[in-house]
Image (tube, rainbow, N blue to C red):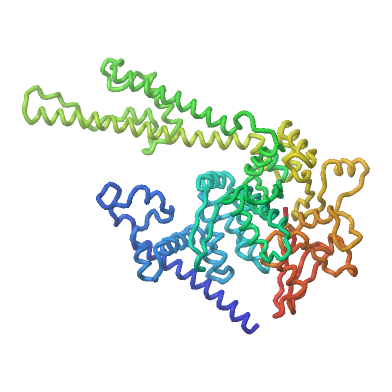
Amino acid sequence: MGALGAMQAADREIARQTAVRARAVAEFAASRPASADRQPGEPGAMSAGRRAARDEVLADVSEWAAPELVIALSISQPAAEDLLERSLALVHRLPGVLAALEAGRLHVGHLRPLLDHVAPIADATVRGWVEREALDWVAGRSVTTPPQLGAKLRRLVLAHDAEAAARRLVKALRERGISARPDHREGMSVVTALLTTPEAAALMDALGRYADALDEPGDRRTRGQKMTDVLLDLVLRPGEHDHGPVRAQLTVVAGVPALLGGNQPGEIGGQAVPAEMVRALARALGLLPAADGAPAAERADIDAERWTAADERWWADVEARALRGEWGGEDEPPPEVMEQIWAREAAWYPPDDGLDEPARAQQPDDDTATPAATGTGGWATADTAVDAAGAALLDLDSALGRARRAVADAERADALDEHAWQLSPAGRISAAGNALDALAAATDASRAALADLLEATAGGGLADRPRIALVDELTGALLALTDAPELRRAAQHGTGLGPPPPTDGYRPATRLDRYVRARDRRCRQPGCRRLVARGELDHDRPYPDGPTAAHNLTGFCTGHHRGKHQAPGWTYDLRPDGTLTVTTPSGLTATTTPPPY
């Protein structure tokens, strides 16, 4: 294909060479072990804070490996550390991705989302599953951009590694903040705010509405420039402007399992978010009741803590009785106490020498009793030292026993927590294969709360009533967008539900506009991740030759909507099922379908 073919071949070679470089960096890192550095406690060793801040994959790598890369590759220290982290994660945690990169099935732009979302998964089984699922997904598509891959990975991780994702979210919440850095353009700086997804979506929507309200003759500012000026007015010049109040609008997509307490992720402003974030937002808006009482998993934690405390008290009592000499100077407690000790030990950890605890206790002692020297001099000092060493070993053995029991307690608490969660409504909902099974697993109170949410109407803090998306269980395709009253009417009269009827006229009616936006959500141009802009629903067959109907409408962002009509040599073909095929002037084709729910 001429120049385009040469570009594609070059990209495949760049991907292959990136894999080669990653292997070489990993080999170099292995030759610079952390064991060669000064160890903690030694003068000049890496500080504890810096050691804790390093990525886990660098734990066994010398802190001086990065400076060596700086000299070898003429890159900065942060870039060298980033290269080490990415290369080691790729080689040791994502072997399938490395192989696909080497074979040219991925390009280097795909690496960042895979390293950001998949590599951190601690469970190797889950990580391998998500990696394979992502690679299969990319292989089945004609065009996959890094943002599209990132969105897919966020959903996969939230669905299959929800607990770890929640921990990462909690950590990220502690890192919320705002910062500024110089831009490459002279006199300009970039302000970055790390916010939760709902906060960011609400902020952008509100600024956009303020900007859209500024309709002054001769104002040549772009929408982005107006949003920037509004932000500065609101923050730096409060009370000195005439910006009227606006109401931010968020589009929240939540499946039945997420609202009932399951782990299935939701969507806010087109971004996948953890289910708990959706529920927290719904509770804040008064759509769901506040959570009351400790969940089953928390109750399991409480029970485990109580059991552990009781066990620790029992062992402390046995040790105290031994120190008080309650057993008449015997070397060990009486048989009935020893049986209790053996039972508790056997319940927590297996023996490591092939003997059970009673057999081990009955093994003859290798040392023979030596009468204490009565005189003074070297032998008396030696006997005293031996006695002190024996006492120290006894203390050490006791401490090791307590440590083993603590580890076993933690493992048992985790098992109890996981078991209790699986048996809880939230666990059964997360395991449900479809919405009906999730409803069956939910509590009566959760089902009642969901019914109340679906009955909520406009007014108060809501710009619109909640809508029910009926989707194909197998494909995730949107079949109808309705609400509780319409759902009841359809059931009573036996009428089916589907897309809204066509609109007489060029501009789609409210129901049809809402349906198409809910179906497409993001620009349908291959590779684009922008949200469908207001007023950018395109007629595939131009009106009035083509109807203003769902099967003839496609959602675009402003730029790609303009490009569809103005870019020379591009063709667009929309099928009734929503599949859009785009052909470039050079003959390349790519297809997109409405994103599944």
* Vertical position of residue 153 compared to residue 439: above or below: below
Identify the image quadrant of residue 521: bottom right
The residue at the point 57 percent across, 58 percent down is: 131
> Where does the N terminus fall, quadrant-wise?
bottom right
Residue 8 is at least partly visible in this image: yes
Q: In this view, does 377 lie to the left or right of 423?
A: left
- Spot occupied by residue 520 in the image (x, y as percentages of width and height): 75, 58
The residue at the point 53 percent across, 36 percent down is: 415
Residue nearest the observer in this picture, 190 or 100: 190
Identify the image quadrant of residue 550: bottom right
* Vertical position of residue 57 compared to residue 287: above or below: below
Q: In this view, does 375 lie to the left or right of 122?
A: left
- Spot occupied by residue 251 in the image (x, y as percentages of width and height): 71, 50
- Spot occupied by residue 291 in the image (x, y as percentages of width and height): 64, 32
Residue nearest the observer in this picture, 13 or 41: 41
The residue at the point 81 percent across, 62 percent down is: 577
Q: Is residue 412 left or right of residue 253?
A: left
The residue at the point 78 percent across, 51 percent down is: 471
